Image (cartoon, rainbow, N blue to C red):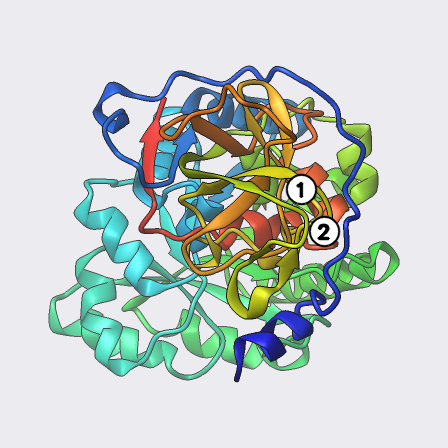
Amino acid sequence: MKRRKFFQLLGWGAVGSFWPERKNIISSEASVPKKNSHSMDAWIEIDLAAIAWNLQQIKKRTSTKIMAVVKANAYGHGLVEVSQALEKSGVDWLMVGKLDEASTLRRAGLKGPLLNFGPFDRRDAEQIIKERISQSVYTDEVFFLAEAAAKVGAQASIHLDLDTGMGRTGMAYELALRFLEKVASNRHLRLEGISTTLTEDVEFDREQVRRLNEVFTQAKKRGINCGLRHAASSAGLLASPEFYLDMVRPGITLYGYYPNAPTQKEDPLQLKPALRLKARVIFIKDLKPGDTLSYHRAFKASKKMRVATLSLGYSDGYQPQLGGKSWAIIRGQKCPVLPIITANHLMVDLEGNQEVNAGEEALLIDSVAGSPLSAAALSEASGLSTYRLLIGLNPLLTRYFI
């Protein structure tokens, strides 16, 4: 695909001169660690104290156990370091979405309860047993785990995932009792929990919980202990206590954001965003009216301009849709991001500022609640979800934990 077509698909076909209203602000930015002071590459700063605060706020909301969701590199924040901080703060469980994530945490020395909500097959069974990973199951593949456990005289820890209406994965709830009987009769399987994923349609979520509870009750009548019931993500946590059951599974709220616009506006948990994204100015250029920039001359200056190139692009996870809709904060000034984001670079309008020099910091995502550069504000401006803005950040970007 030609670059021109690529830009058109992103909605940049006719690059205009629209910019959000300019405001001069000073952000409460943390100092860059000295070890990064020589680097011109973009980086991320993570406030682990903010994540610990958010966990405590969630604990105030519910007395149930908490399974912290750290899938997708802890929503872009850093899998190992965030998990260590959560474990230190007393979280009950961790949940990942891939077996490799679970193994990474075990190799890093985390020893607490850990659920892999992602898939596995027979070839993975021995590793799951050896690394004491609890595995979500919903097919007869569970007996691969039993085989591997039997070889070493152990038990495989499992959580049965029910499809109560989400339709994505999970055993159909109508078939669960027969399956539970087979699991309960196998001495090499230990059933630790029974779960489902809610659709976040509150009325239907109630029906989903009713279905889960019915399976749980009928199994109990047959002498089967299903362990912990869990269904509520951050949305369920905020919707109603009836979804809490025995354990909740917060994700986005741990990182200082909410699952939807109404709860983001209300801020019922008084959350603290934990992530800042920064880059450096690597080049400054003065333009005359008619000068053009980037591939296929995608941007044309309509007036004299002073622009800065930053060491950040869409390969780093800075979404192209933010072009023309966001800013970089340099020396406390909001500098509009031009709609010409490429793989490794973006450019900003310095609006005539002659004091900015190459090597200076630029803030692209802020950790201050209410900032125009918070992930929530960027989500509103671009139409992209907060989840995508955070999870999409390249795991290879250097992260500093402060």
Cα–Cα gap, marks 2 and 1 = 8 Å
- Circle 2 is placed at which residue position? 382
- In x, y percent, where is residue 339? 64, 54
CA neighbours of label 1 inside 10 A, class few (<14), some (14 to 19), many (20+): many
- In x, y percent, where is residue 135? 38, 63
Earlier residue among tags 2 and 1: 1
Three-letter residue code for mark 1? Ser
- In x, y percent, where is residue 284? 46, 37
Q: Is residue 348 above or below residue 29?
A: below
Question: Image check: 38 left or right of 361?
Answer: left
Three-letter residue code for mark 2? Ser
- Identify the residue at horizontal 68%, vertical 55% (top origin): 384
- Identify the residue at horizontal 35%, vertical 45% (top origin): 79
CA neighbours of label 2 inside 10 A, class few (<14), some (14 to 19), many (20+): some
Q: Are marks 2 and 1 in contact (CB under 8 Å)?
A: yes
- Identify the residue at horizontal 74%, vertical 23% (top origin): 23
Residue 250 visible, this angle: no
- In x, y percent, where is residue 83? 36, 38
The C terminus sits in image quarter? top left
Which is more toward the observer, 105 or 146? 105
Q: Which mark is residue 236?
A: none
Which is more toward the observer, 54 or 41? 41
Label 1: which secondary element: loop
Q: Is residue 137 above or below residue 131?
A: below
Front position among marks 2 and 1: 1
- Identify the residue at horizontal 54%, vertical 67% (top origin): 161
- Circle 1 is placed at which residue position? 326
